[in-house]
Image: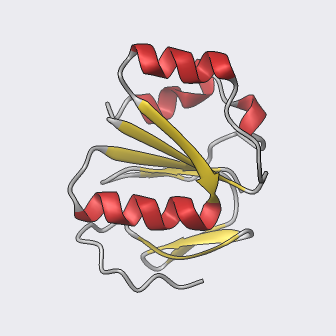
Amino acid sequence: MHINLEAADQNSIQAYSDEGIKVGSSTYQSSLIISTHEIISEWPISSIQELDEESLEPLLRYQPKIIIIGHKQQGKFAPQPTILALAKRRIGLETMSIGAACRTFNVLLNEQREVVIGLII
């Protein structure tokens, strides 16, 4: 699905599907991390159950206020110890479908919020 919202940032998500994400002119077909100014196209995560502090470290280096995780596993959430560890750091963790995650990320970018997204493809 194409996103029509005009994000003010170069790393806004242009389109998404369960098979890939389009950022600018590039399409990514494996799990990735997108921050305001950087894309990490090799994030070795294939399931939301794999999320722990170590796997989230590449996202934490951006010192976000909110981490968004988009995934295809409807009804699944991050492990409770991971949620608690982030809460202790005062970092919000939101897990949602890939589409909802992409749209939310772009809205927060437009609001100039400190946000990073991990997409599990």
Apparent side of residue 59 relative to residue 45 in the rendered image (left or right): left
Residue situated furthest front in the rendering = 75
Q: Nearer the viewer, residue 82 or 46?
A: 82
Q: Quadrant of the N terminus?
A: bottom right
* Residue 107, quarter of picture: bottom left
- Residue 41 drawn at (x, y percent): 57, 53
- Say above or below: 90 vs 38: above
- Say above or below: 23 vs 43: below
- Say above or below: 114 vs 89: below
- Residue 93 drawn at (x, y percent): 50, 35
Apparent side of residue 120 relative to residue 3 in the rendered image (left or right): right
Q: Nearer the viewer, residue 113 or 118?
A: 113
Give the image's coloring scheme: secondary structure
- Residue 50 drawn at (x, y percent): 74, 30
Residue drawn at x 64%, y 23% is 52
Residue drawn at x 20%, y 55% is 112
Q: Quadrant of the C terminus?
A: bottom right
- Residue 39 drawn at (x, y percent): 45, 54
Q: How many dots with numbers?
A: 0
